[in-house]
Amino acid sequence: MNAPTEPILDIRGLRTVFRTRGGEITAVNGIDLTVGAGETVALVGESGSGKSVTSLSVMRLLTRNIGSIAAGSIHFRSKDGRSRDLAVLDEQQMRQIRGDDIGMVFQEPMSSLNPVFTIGDQISEPLRVHRNAARKSAMEAAITLLEQVGIPDARRRAGQYPHELSGGMRQRATIAMALACDPTLLIADEPTTALDVTIQAQILDLLLKLQRERGMGVLFVTHNLGVVAEIAHRVAVMYAGRIVEQGPVAEVFRNPRHPYTLGLLASMPKLGEATRLKQDGQKLAAIPGVVPSLANMPGGCAFSPRCRFAIGACQAGVPMLESVDAVHQSRCIRWQEVGQ
Amino acid sequence: MTATPFISVRDLAKHYVSRGTRLNILEGISFDIAKGEVVGLVGESGSGKTTIGRSVLRLVEPSAGSVKFDGTELTTLSSAQMRRTRPRMQYIFQDPFASLSPRMTIGEILTEGLKIQGIGTRRQRVDRARAALEQVDLPADAIHRYAHEFSGGQRQRIGIARALTLAPEFLVADEPVSALDVSIQAQVINLLRDLQQRLGLTMLFISHDLAVVEYICDRVIVLYLGRIMEIAPSADLYARPQHPYTRALLSAIPSPDPDAPRNRQILKGDIPSLANPPSGCVFRTRCPNALEACAGVAPQLRQVAPGHYKACIRDDLN
């Protein structure tokens, strides 16, 4: 796995809030995260951890008047080498970036494709909008893209509508659309979650290949730790709106230094291990309790009510992200004892 | 297969007709479940696992075949007879949000089955509901509250409690942990295993997640496009998968272990349409080991090791 280069995405102190009837809630609470050129960074967490809100904040796709960026900066280096803070750009400037410098792939391919336009039309759209490409040449480019994402019989498929494609094919088509303008950053939010496991394997393989070929930076949002190990160089584990641990995937998964990461890894049933557990009469190591509600966050470390390492000092304040080593950080005051 | 099965399914089939096309959702499904045994049904979308679960309880009517429950043929029972049998068999649904009525209190949800069956007085029914809540580690005062007041994991516990109030002997659990977060999923898996062992329940456990199935099931049935590909005791299936589809399915699961070998075998193509299934073996269009002969007749299940069956004509794969 390559060493990270100068970041193309540099998020500092990002705080994203939502206005609700019960008052303002903070979904993302001070995130620092970078993605280097050619680097895949996975943002992993459970429901309500803030991982998707982080990616929506970067794309500036938060529902207007409900969600907004309250603090922080999101510096992004576009293809022309210019670095701009996405957090303060206006909608027109963002439109020039989305689909051109930043490609996006979402969980549900059926809802990110328009049912009344052909696949070819939709893949050529970014080229026509951002490159002023003529209809015919854009369509030819779309067919080439469909071939690159492994869709057989691409010319015929380009003339079909989304409902005529299988789930896996549709996700390949949305990837082709995201890549049409050769973005430097791809944001993929749970792109394989809705797919069957054999199709997921195909899509992960495709994303790995495309990422290597094109040297894109990828921000990959997922809840699946197995997928993280498969696709990412670095991982940031989120819990209750904060990054609680980050570092190179192999390092974090081999040597987790936050009790939440440790618990997540242990609570995942792993192939081959289950038979042994069962024979030994052992249980899966579940994390007790529930994910706290954003409207009602525990004081101090948000994970402490569920944490078997928790001590009185954990309530004192939100722990700082401490360095385990040069590339690995944990937001736990007892990280030295965790995983020992 | 077992000597005196508690559940015995033979040649179960389900067909639908959609816009003039006949869809064979299930074909020739036969298996047994012994008393107190947990059998897993795994497969991808369209494999028919949910249809099997529902057909066994006659929540959908099978098109053909036989389902015997403790010696009684269910498929020919009248609806009145079926209703009398139902308390002995219950269903746990996947989606804890859709399967609990938002307008009923948890107490009403938990006592509804008892009421329909005419079991006990009001007071006794409420006591049963409280006991069921205790079995799933929820506070007894939950009976006055509504489903929206609970998290996903808690709702799934309520769904399990509802199935338990009737003191069933047989449970069909349809993807009971798939909608839950990983940390909560482990809690519910542990709970289901505890209950199964403590109450001696017989269970059909439906899941797309082979790792979850390995943990909870004694035997596993692997389905593809409405047909059984392989049946084996859990430990044997995971250590020595025999069918090329099972092997591919196991190899497709991403492992969080950074030291795990990444020699993934990736299946080409898509799951075929049920409207136009391949001839012969339905898996052959994606099978890395397919021969010309595979297009001929659909392979029958045959025993390859004690209790281990596969529907594949090849014996030379290792």
Image: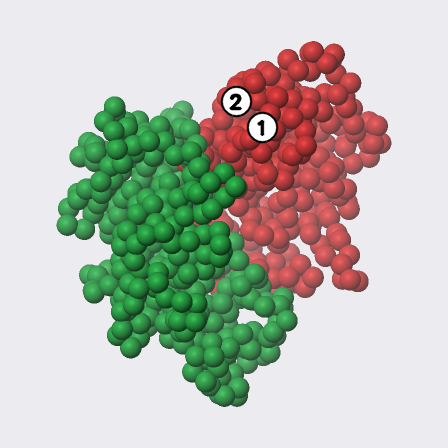
Dividing the image into 4 quarters, which one contains the C terminus of chain A? top left
Residue B5 picture quarter: top right
> In the image, what residue type sits under mark 2?
Leu
> In the image, what residue type sits under mark 1?
Ile
Residue A267 spot, x, y in % from top left? 38, 36
Q: Which residue is mark 2?
A: B138
Q: Is residue A254 above or below residue A109?
A: above
Q: Chain B: give its colour.
A: red
* Same chain assignment for discs 1 and 2: yes
Q: Nearer the viewer, residue A339 or A18?
A: A18
Tag 2, which secondary structure?
Answer: loop
Q: Nearer the viewer, residue A331 or A159?
A: A331
Q: Is residue A281 above or below residue A69?
A: above
User: Can the viewer see residue B308 in this picture?
Assistant: no
- Left or right, A108 with reference to B296: left
Dividing the image into 4 quarters, which one contains the N terminus of chain A? bottom left
Residue A221 spot, x, y in % from top left? 39, 54
Q: Are marks 1 and 2 in contact (CB under 8 Å)?
A: yes
Q: Which residue is mark 1?
A: B158
Q: Chain A: give its colour.
A: green
Q: Residue at x 45, y 52 (%)?
A: A67
- Left or right, B85 with reference to B129: right
Q: Residue at x 43, y 71 (%)?
A: A92
